[in-house]
Image: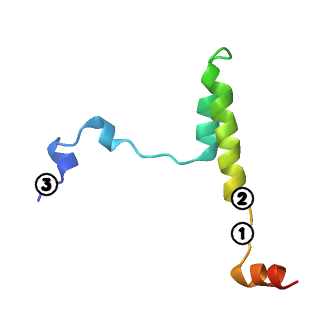
Amino acid sequence: MLLHKEAGIVPEYEEQQLNLSIDTLRNKILSFDEDNPNKKIFLEQLNQAIHQLTLQSILPSEQTIYLVW
């Protein structure tokens, strides 16, 4: 049985691996020209996403303690 990739059916863009590295994304944004208006917006959005991912969530039991006191 031939795989689609071996048979040459899969387009090139589907063969590329998805890179979810924050460093890679940051470097791509930093490579934008300084006069690109989206550069600052993208960096701010990336910082917000990183901040949300690193926030420690309050466990339901801890939240109940706060409500009681």
Residue 56, quarter of picture: bottom right
- Name the residue beneath numbered marker 3: 2
Any part of residue 31 in sight: no
Which label sits in the foreground, 1 or 3?
1
* CB-based contact (under 8 Å), mark 2 and mark 1: no
Q: Nearer the viewer, residue 11 or 60?
A: 60
Disc 2 or 3, which lies upstream in sequence? 3
Amino acid type indicated by mark 2: Thr
Label 3 packing within 10 angstroms: few (<14), some (14-19), many (20+): few
29 over 69 or under it: above or below: above
Tell me: 16 left or right of 56. left
**What's the mark number on residue 54?**
2
Label 1 packing within 10 angstroms: few (<14), some (14-19), many (20+): few
Q: What kind of element bears circle 1?
A: loop
Any part of residue 24 in sight: yes
**What's the mark number on residue 57?**
1
Image point (68%, 28%), residue name: 40
